[in-house]
Image: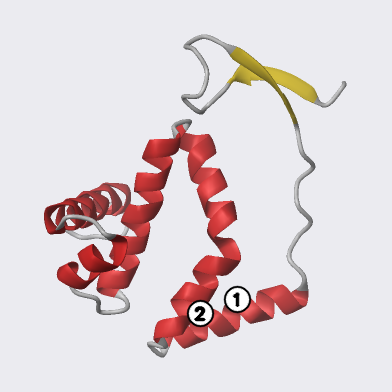
Amino acid sequence: MTGRCTVPHPLPLHAPGRYVRIRRLPLPSPPTADATRADVALLDRITAQDPAALGELYDRHSRLIFGLVLRMLRNQDEAEEAVDQRDLIQQAYFLGFTHSELAERYRLPLGTVKTRIRSGMQTLRRHLDGRYIEQ
């Protein structure tokens, strides 16, 4: 096996039906004990409502999260919106930002912020329904 495969390119940069050749990259090695301890410490800080901790955790893993979402959705605009939705929910519910503050922070209309948070919460509810949420 050459380590190469041909798949439809997920980004809208190419004409429909056009294929590009990509290389399969090796899987990353498991996190080190130090990296795991650092993440656990950040989670402890988030639990203690340290406003900087969530940003630090996001900075550590944002590229990995975006890459995963992009591979799942195969559309860069949708992937960016999904990541923004997740960020808006975290900042509204765990860090206490108001919708107006988030609109200003992300330079989005207030209605867009409200819609993304509501849509994200509905999606989360659908995924958790029946497993963790009693009706």
Query: Disc 2 designates what residue?
Result: 43
**Label of residue 102 in the image:** none
48 vs 93: above or below: below
Location of residue 92 in the rendering, given as x and y in whole percent from the top left corner: 25, 71
The amino acid sitting under disc 2 is Leu
Q: Is residue 46 visible?
A: no
Secondary element at tag 2: helix
Residue lying farthest to the left in this orientation: 111
Question: Which of the two residues, 86 or 125, is positioned nearer the viewer here?
Answer: 86
Quarter holding the C terminus is bottom left
- The CA distance from mark 2 to mark 1 is 6 Å
Location of residue 69 in the rendering, given as x and y in whole percent from the top left corner: 48, 44
Question: Which of the two residues, 12 or 32, is positioned nearer the viewer here?
Answer: 12
Query: Disc 1 designates what residue?
Result: 39
* Residue positioned 47% across, 74% down in the render: 55
* Residue positioned 50% across, 28% down in the render: 11
Q: Can residue 32 be seen in this view?
A: yes
4 vs 80: above or below: above
The amino acid sitting under disc 1 is Asp
- Label 1 neighbourhood size at 10 Å, few (<14), some (14-19), many (20+)? some
11 vs 94: above or below: above
Quarter location, residue 31 = bottom right
